[in-house]
Image: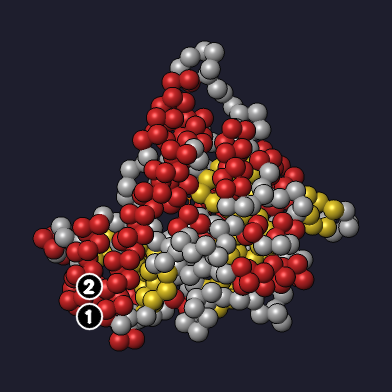
Amino acid sequence: MPTINENFLKMEKNYLFINIAKKIKAYSDANPEKAKNIIRMGIGDVTLPIAKCVIDAMKKGADEMSVKETFKGYEDSGAGYEFLREAVSDYYKSFGVDVLADDIRINDGAKADCGNIVDIFGDDNTVLITDPAYPVYVDTNLMNGRKVIFADSNEENGFAAMPDQNVHADLIYLCSPNNPTGSVYTKDQLKVWIDYALKNNAIIIYDAAYEAFITENDIPRSIYEINGSKKCAIEMCSLSKTAGFTGMRCGYTVVPRELVVKASDGTEVSISQLWGRRQGSKFNGVSYPVQCAAAAVFTKEGLREIKQNIQYYQENARIISGVLNELGIKYTGGKNSPYIWLKCPNNIGSWEFFDKLLEEANVVGTPGAGFGKNGEGWFRLTAFGDRDKTIEAMERFKKII
Ligand SMILES: *Cc1c(COP(=O)(O)O)cnc(C)c1O
């Protein structure tokens, strides 16, 4: 009989959204009529279809697979076709960031890389994660038995945690614009994190999945906008929220060649080389038609079409924020993010508010407590829904407060 990885037994039994789904099912079974009216503003999934030019590119890629001359088997490097890596590199250039196509690896979404990247780091590292945070960062490190410490994001700091200079960390996860809180780091704040990482010889894993939602010009869209970052940061991004790729699966990770660490015998090791080695053994690349689709996202037409979808979600966010303003409810996000992170009215708990909203308004959101202890008393709504449903949900919200 094999032994198991007992670290799994120390974790929450279910991923947050499975617990939420169970609650919705229990309510729906007991109230089948009301269940028909449920509006979901919980899971961070997009709802608008993918841009036409992107789907056309995918079809063209699929057709190429049916012709002997253009058929593609395994990709040589598994790092992604050069046409797509160049397109991502050019996209970075469009907002003033220099990232070499050779330092970009294409993947089937950022979640996998966020989790898998830790394979190349020792289990004796101390991992610093903001609280609240996207559950993947914590879970993936607990699975390997790593020590996880937290930096508090809370009402006082606008849910933008800063490092404690007296605490040492080896790996740091940052996410801006943040899921779940919708908060963003300014350039000055990111500089503080970079200086902290350089001082501690730490590496930052920077999740930029929501960069396309940034509306304010002075908010950084990439950690590489800040000096010194290439020596201490890996950046992950995804087309999931940017271009509606949650069901298509494509993202990219940047590991700058400047990023080196010392092995125990003192030799310098390139993080990019280690990550390439890991991926070479455990990952065989993203399907060709999907990479064709992804490249089309970065064309002029693609960028124009995805912008329309993002603006639709941004308008939803304004509608949600508007109602919260009216009601005098505190919140972060909504401005540079599809998430609105609100303080539960009357100081009730996150799960209590979840039940109230589900039962009295038939609206589903996400309890902040599911993202960490500082999320208790807070609640996440997403702007990824239909316009009409968002308006209707907020009308119902108003009535029960
Ligand atoms: C949605 C999301 C991602 C993207 O995940 P994919 O695997 O690319 O779909 C990454 N990070 C955060 C914080 C997210 O919310």
Secondary structure of the residue carrying numbered label 1: loop
Q: Is residue 235 visible in the rendered structure shown here?
A: yes
In this picture, is 111 found above or below 304? below
The amino acid type of the residue labelled 1 equals Ile
Going by the image, does 280 lie left or right of 42?
right
User: In the depicted view, which residue is nearer to us: 357 or 329?
Assistant: 329
Whether disc 2's CB lies below 8 Å from ligand 1 is answered no
Q: Which quadrant, please, contains the C terminus?
A: bottom left
For this orientation, the residue located farthest to the top is 68
Residue at position x 43%, y 52% from top?
Answer: 241
Q: Which mark is residue 397?
A: 2
Secondary structure of the residue carrying numbered label 2: helix
| Number of callouts | 2
Residue 11 position in % (x across, y down): 51, 66
Q: Which residue is mark 1?
A: 401
CA neighbours of label 1 inside 10 A, class few (<14), some (14 to 19), many (20+): few
Residue 185 position in % (x across, y down): 56, 69
- Are the residues flagged by discs 1 and 2 in contact, CB closer than 8 Å? yes
The amino acid type of the residue labelled 2 equals Phe
User: In the depicted view, which residue is nearer to us: 63 or 132?
Assistant: 63
CA neighbours of label 2 inside 10 A, class few (<14), some (14 to 19), many (20+): some
Residue 19 position in % (x across, y down): 35, 64
In this picture, is 298 found above or below 237? above
Q: Which mark is residue 10?
A: none
Going by the image, does 227 lie left or right of 18?
right
Q: Is residue 133 visible in the rendered structure shown here?
A: no
Residue 245 position in % (x across, y down): 42, 44
Residue at position x 75%, y 67% from top?
Answer: 198
Residue at position x 50%, y 40% from top?
Answer: 298
For this orientation, the residue located farthest to the right is 266
Residue 356 found in image quarter: bottom left
Residue at position x 54%, y 51% from top?
Answer: 237
